[in-house]
Amino acid sequence: MNEIMLNLFELQALEFEETFQPGFAERIEHLRSRIPKPILSHYDRLGDRGKKGVAVLRHQVCTGCHLSVPLNAVLDLKRGKEPRVCDNCRRYLYLLEDD
């Protein structure tokens, strides 16, 4: 599951990049093909509304909406069980390796 979230986080970084560089389109298509359709669909719905689909989780706080995330969601992310979304902003939560 961590690989899926890493791909989703990288996809977001490429899609929100202000300068488009050669090879971006191919890399974006490659990443999109590696993400399950239900997850990608939810991500795209947020993007259609002008929101980023992934937020980093820092110190048990979603960086998308700046609200606290329940401890069980943090533990699920650390275990890599399943993707979790913020209960408030509905963005996928991405836990950095350092945290």
Image: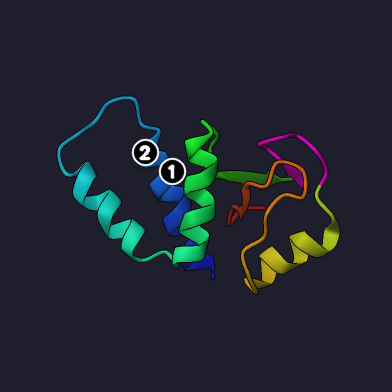
Vertical relation: 71 (above or below) 47: below
Q: Which secondary structure dominates the residues rendered in magenta? A: loop
Disc 2: which residue: 15
In the image, 78: left or right of 30?
A: right
Q: Amino acid at mark 1?
A: Gln
Vertical relation: 21 (above or below) 94: above
Q: Which residues are magenta?
A: 59-68
The one nearer the camera, 72 or 38, is: 38
Q: Amino acid at mark 2?
A: Glu
Circles 2 and 1, Cβ within 8 Å, touching? The answer is yes
- The residues tagged by marks 2 and 1 sit, at their Cα atoms, a distance apart of 5 Å
Residue 26 visible here? yes
Locate residue 73, reporting x and y percent: 77, 61
In the image, 54: left or right of 24?
A: right
Residue plotted at (72% across, 68% down): 76
Q: Quadrant of residue 68?
A: top right
The residue lying furthest to the top in this view is: 18
The one nearer the camera, 96 or 76, is: 76
Q: How many marks?
A: 2
Residue plotted at (68% across, 66% down): 78
Disc 1: which residue: 12
In the image, 37: left or right of 76?
A: left
| Residue 41 forms part of the magenta stretch | no
Locate residue 17, reporting x and y percent: 36, 31
